[in-house]
Image (cartoon, rainbow, N blue to C red):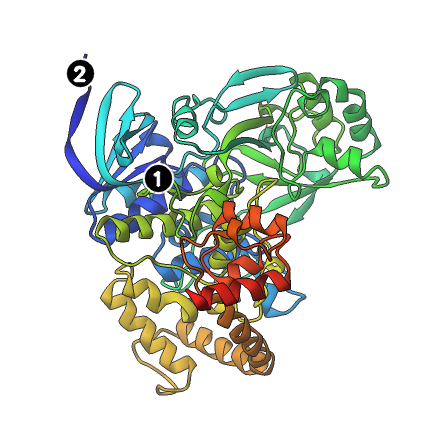
Amino acid sequence: MAEAIFPRRYDVIVVGGGHAGVEAALSAARMGRKTLLLTQNLDTIAAMSCNPSIGGVGKGQMVRELDALGGEMAKAADRSSFFSQTLNLSKGQAVRSPRAQCDKAAYRSGQKAAVESCANLDPVQDEAWELWVEGSRLRGVTSRRGTRYEGKTVVLTTGTFLNGLAHVGLKTHAAGRGGEAPSLGISSSLIALGFEVGRLKTGTPPRLHARTVDFSKLERQDGDPVPKAFSHFNLHIANPQLPSWVAYTNAATHRVIRDNLERSPLYSGKIEGVGPRYCPSIEDKVVKFPQKQRHQLFLEPEGWSTNELYLNGMSTSLPEDAQRALVASIPGLENALLTRCGYAIEYDFCQPTQLTDTLESRGVPGLFLAGQINGTTGYEEAAGQGLLAGVNAALSARGEAPFRLGRDEAYLGVMIDDLVVRGVDEPYRMFTARAENRLSLRADDADMRLMEKGSALGLIAPEARERFLRYRDLVLGAGESSDAELSPWSMAKVREQREIRASYEPYISRERGSAERLKAAELVEIPAGLDYAAIGALTNESRQKLSRLRPRTLGQAGRVPGVTPSDLQILWVHARAK
């Protein structure tokens, strides 16, 4: 039977409705491009599959940057947050990071509403099965039910769904995440197009019923007395706040884990994929840190209208009976009911060195990849990639110049550069330590750094830009000392920003000088067709890696592992000669 062609044609087709997909679709549509969001289930748009939080060290900075560029994540977090914290308060502003726990249902429904109300954006429930390619030209995607969706560009944001396998003990079943089917077609399509596809894994802890927890044995933890908003456009948070609770593992907990290691898919060899080193399972914590007598756990509410608690710190894929024994060994949780078991999920990903720094495939023009398909972990990393991929797909669809962020401009720029130049050997997570210029990439000044860029892309409304410009002028001392159109909350933020900038300026000036020297290398473009194999003076390792990765600039080449300073000098000579 002939395949049916969907009656509408698109500039941008986004496959997947998670955190990356939502930002990609919204950004492309807001830039005026006809956009399709194709997802397996419209009711799980922007679902918080794992923890109920947004932000954290390095991650909170990216959420603020997303907001400044016109993204939606910060606004969604502000609408649904019930516990706000500024992490690293005892340290300097450069590493202070906002974090909020959110009502999962409210977050999801808010993001779905944003998608449904966005002009130029069609949300459609269907499963993408393969990429529609004719010769060397990408035409769109074909769905599992045989419908062909035609688009000038495609953004894949498939999360953990590609050939996903869920593990609980030695039992395995196909799944994209708990209770949802995997995506089984796209991986084969990518492999057929020459993509290098590997396996990674992540996991989630059990959930508990709050009514069965003895909170008198736990430590109460409250958020900041005055919750701060993520978004520049929200002055304060008026949502009702909820506490979290702290518990600890003990010798009995660790004994349960050691007694059941042979039944763990992580330690039996059943799981092949590599997991995130910075978010280890409770099994890994006990095995790799035997000297630690206890590990901290956080019982976090999943929302205002649910009794489920997220047991942060106890990610596990042990068998169900072992998980019950684990939880029961902890004071306060002796009689706790597990409403959902923890599990590990194993899935396909594409090595991101196969992409340019616009997140476009090197081998298939018009195809962009964003989120966990690129080997990252976390809602924030996914959303950041989604926005940048959506923006560049929108620009590509009209033949316009791409949009890039440098390492000195944003954590988002650091992340993209890390991914496409260095690749991943484990799920990538952002930290402030990854940025060379973190003094000037603070969470508090993301709007000052990036909002004009978001406005130039058409992602910041004109009235919002005008309000920002008044705020910026006041911060820089170019406006009056007070402004009737800015509320007392805004003026308090102006004063805070002036103080921070004054105290950091000497250090930032020094950092800026270093950044300018590095930028000189970033501006030296390497000819696209340069034949590295023919440059005999390069080391063998450099020739091989540079031929495979095709760095765009001398700066990128310098960050390729194994490329030496002498190799860079040789490349500089060849670049100048061309």
**Looking at the image, is 267 positioned above or below residue 438?**
above
Most distant residue in the left direction: 7
In the image, what residue type sits under mark 2?
Answer: Ala
Disc marking residue 364 = 1
**Looking at the image, is 164 positioned above or below residue 512?**
above
Q: Do the residues under discs 1 and 2 have CB atoms within 8 angstroms? A: no
Mark 1 Cα-neighbour bin, 10 Å: few <14, some 14–19, many ≥20: some
Q: Nearer the viewer, residue 240 or 231?
A: 231
Residue occupied by mark 2: 2
In the image, what residue type sits under mark 1?
Answer: Val
Most distant residue in the right direction: 291
Q: In the rendered structure, which disc, 1 or 2, sits on the residue that comes first in sequence? A: 2
Q: Give x and y (percent) for residue 28.
A: 27, 49
Real-space Cα distance between discs 1 and 2?
Answer: 25 Å
**In terms of secondary structure, where does tag 1 sit?**
loop
Q: Give x and y (percent) for residue 232.
A: 39, 64
> Which residue is depicted at the point 40% across and 66% down?
450
